[in-house]
Image (cartoon, rainbow, N blue to C red):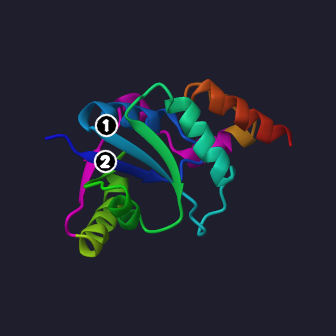
Amino acid sequence: MKLNAVYPGTFDPITNGHQDLVRRAARMFERVFVAIAANPNKTPMFPLAMRVDLARRVLGDLPNVEVLGYANLTVDFAREHQVSVILRGLRAVSDFEFEFQLANMSRHLERDIETVFLTPQEQFTFISSTLVREVAVLGGNVSEFVHPIVEAELKKRRRT
């Protein structure tokens, strides 16, 4: 039996690590929703519409992946889209405590939705959107960390 999954996050911007997890998840699940959070608690570099657009352009070759923005609880998004699995990435042991808390809260809010953890390929374990933004803003080369489409948008942001 194939299941649907949601991969939630801020994706500010989507990195090669995110892309790696989505591509692998697309082979495991019938449908994968990349749910890009509005997240009012953060001040993203890119507005929600741009983050959704970038992710759609980067992942557009995957027929079973749909990128959507959302502003509610992830479990509510999952219910609305008939998703039974929340996919979360673990880069390092330091990610585990926070992700474990999120998984337990999700289970408390909705018992029928499970959280599954994936680790990225080794070359992506140190990449985070925060670090990519910082390197880009300071004029560093981020071509190894993001898709060329995202790199071009980061360069535009630096000039403005």
Q: Quadrant of the C terminus?
A: top right
Residue 73 location (% of width, % of height)? 43, 68
Residue 143 location (% of width, % of height)? 61, 25
**Residue at image mark 2:** 5
Q: Residues within 10 Å of mark 1 (few under 14, many from 20)?
A: many
Q: Is residue 50 at all visible to an observer of this figure?
A: yes
Answer with left or right where residue 67 lies relative to residue 112.
right
Label 2, label 1: how many angstroms apart (C-alpha)? Answer: 8 Å
What residue is rendered at 85% in x and 38% in y? 159
Answer with left or right where residue 160 lies relative to residue 105.
right
What residue is rendered at 63% in x and 53% in y? 48
Front-most of 90 and 47? 47
Q: Residues within 10 Å of mark 2 (few under 14, many from 20)?
A: many
What residue is rendered at 66% in x and 39% in y? 135
Q: Quadrant of residue 131?
A: top right
Q: Is residue 125 at all visible to an observer of this figure?
A: no
Q: Quadrant of the N terminus?
A: top left
Relative to 123, residue 80 above or below: below
In this picture, which residue range is highlighted in magenta? 111-135
| Label 2 residue SS | strand
Q: Are the two marked residues, 2 and 1, in contact with CB atoms closer than 8 angstroms?
A: yes
Label ID, residue 105? none
| Label 1 residue SS | helix
**Residue at image mark 1:** 25
What's the amino acid at mark 2?
Ala
First in residue order: circle 2 vs circle 1:
2
Q: Residue furthest bottom?
A: 108
Residue 31 location (% of width, % of height)? 32, 40
| Magenta residue check for 38 | no
Relative to 40, residue 64 above or below: above
What's the amino acid at mark 1?
Ala
